[in-house]
Image (cartoon, rainbow, N blue to C red):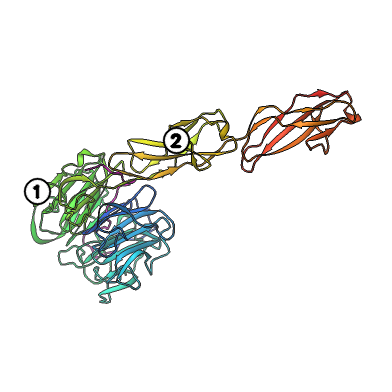
Amino acid sequence: MPTKHALVSTLLLPLALGASLTATAPSYAAPATSTTPLPTIAVGQRHSLLIAGDGRVWGAGTDDSKQIGSCGTVATFCELPPLPDGRRAIAVAVSKQSSYALSSGGTVYGMGRNDEGQLTGPDTTVDHWRRLAGQPSTVTSLSAAGKTVAVTGSDGRAYLTGANSCKLTGGATSFSTLTPMEVYTGADIGARRVSVGSGDFCVVVGAHGKAWAVGDNSAGQTTANNGKLVWLNAPAAGVSVRAAAVGDSSTAVLGSDGNVYSIGANANYQFGDGTKTSATEAKWAQMGGINGRATSVAVGGTTVVVGTAGGTVYGVGFNSNGALTGSTSEVTAPTLLSGATAFDPVVEVTLSEDGDTSFLRDSTGVVSGSGYGGYCQLATDCTTLTTVTIGDGQVMAPSADPSVSGPAAVGGKLTARVGAWSIVPDAYDVQWRRNGVAVPGASGPTYTPTNSDAGASLSSRVSGVRLGFTSKTAQSATVRIPARNTVTPSFTGKLTRGSRLTARKGTWYATGYAFAYQWLRNGKAITHATRTTYKVTAKDHRAKLSLRVTATKPAFKTVTATSKPKTAK
């Protein structure tokens, strides 16, 4: 496959936290800042999303409900429209036929299927980013699955819209606006992250590493089913929850000790402790072989993927479509994903809600995946993969703009600084531009301004080069080249009283500059002597006369040049 480029990333997972059984709620003090990164990649059953280094959202797969706008069914990443508030996207989520993006301004938008109110508002299909109704003033995280999307807000509450998969109190089958989740104790839990999955329950991560759950408890995964968030015990003594993900009927959490713990059903070895049982497990089980190295966890169906320190990725559980690579239908113990070690350290992992497709992002920003790809969601050739493969069409985009350094003057050597890129190119193409137009032959990393550049604005336009990747072009801020005087001013005429002197401004390279004249007596300005001619007076007897020419242009450096003095008689 061609190696395409993607965007800058951070470590992450589809988040939600679960813990264990207790009847007493924790005390709640001041909210603690969550350290769990937001997801910059998301993969679903029909499509996938990623955020490029410039904050734009790209999608691959099918658009049968316009979940990737007007891209069509594409086996390569396609750029989606910008978010309506003009901000960068900082997180994405997908459900079966809907897409969601969180802007840096704290607003959530969605597009695609809306048959259960998951995008809020009218219309069963939305082909553009729509602002979800009912959201808090600032959204801090999001999660989506099936026909449900949930968010947390800066007010410390969790909200849900669409199908009532979390079985919230009141008995409604669906919501058409983001609706707050109630807490059983009435406590302020300081919600930081929320996770929904293919099961009928939700988990919220609160302040200080506490986890709260609501919904189906048939496998002991939520401890209660009363339509309100209930506190879960810590997965082990002294261990708080950093992150978690919800599956069919189990929850996996990342503990503060760097281990992964699971609770609920364990029908496909997904607990990673070497056991398999269809019985419910209303207690936490620690995954084997991780040894305190876990940095992220994702769950889909009965499949679990774990990212570890050093960038290695392990998978365990159901694997009939190769999300964990290989051809084994069940992976009974945490096993390295085949092909993942060929990339730079992996910093972000995620799974589709059914567990059939995995997505990874490495430290250079490149996104790869494995498993079911029949809807082209792996951005390959729309087939199922059994090894981690780089998705096609990823974009190299600047996360920090290029710049120009060096002396801004004719004859000064300017150097193009390429800036920071979401995916590091193998090489860069640089084109120097004068007043926005390419300078013929000026395509190297350095450029020396010539006389033709005096009075012009210069910039460098940079694009990345990497086989199989798409590159955006980035342009630096301009540098202004000031006027240049190559022949000093002079004047002609007799230096006797009553004679008229005529200015000669000299030779200048100064596109767009205006010129002003000032006659000088012994180096000091003569009052009102600002024309191109000057009549010698009695005050000039035996004084040294000279001419100063000043070149000015708005926003450019002012340049002056002075003639040699001559003595009046």
Q: What amino acid is found at the position of numbered circle 1 in the picture?
A: Ser
Q: Quadrant of the N terminus?
A: top left
Question: Where in the figure is residue 453, as x and y percent of width and height?
Answer: 56, 35
Q: Amino acid at mark 2?
A: Arg
Q: Nearer the viewer, residue 274 or 314?
A: 314
Mark closest to the chain's N terminus, 2 or 1: 1
Indicate the position of residue 23 as horizontal and vertical percent values.
24, 65
Quadrant of the rendered structure where residue 133 is? Answer: bottom left
Of all residues shown, which one is farthest toward the right? 538
The residue singled out by tag 2 in the image is 417
Looking at the image, which is closer to me, 475 or 335? 475
Disc 2 element: strand
**Vertical position of residue 184 compared to residue 355: above or below:** below
Q: Which residues are magenta?
A: 1-24
Q: Position of residue 534 (x, y in %)?
A: 83, 33
137 left or right, relative to 453 = left
> Does residue 466 sit above or below 504 in this rendering?
below
Q: Main secondary structure of the magenta part?
A: loop
Mark 1 = which residue?
327
State the image coordinates of residue 128 (x, y, percent, origin top left).
36, 63
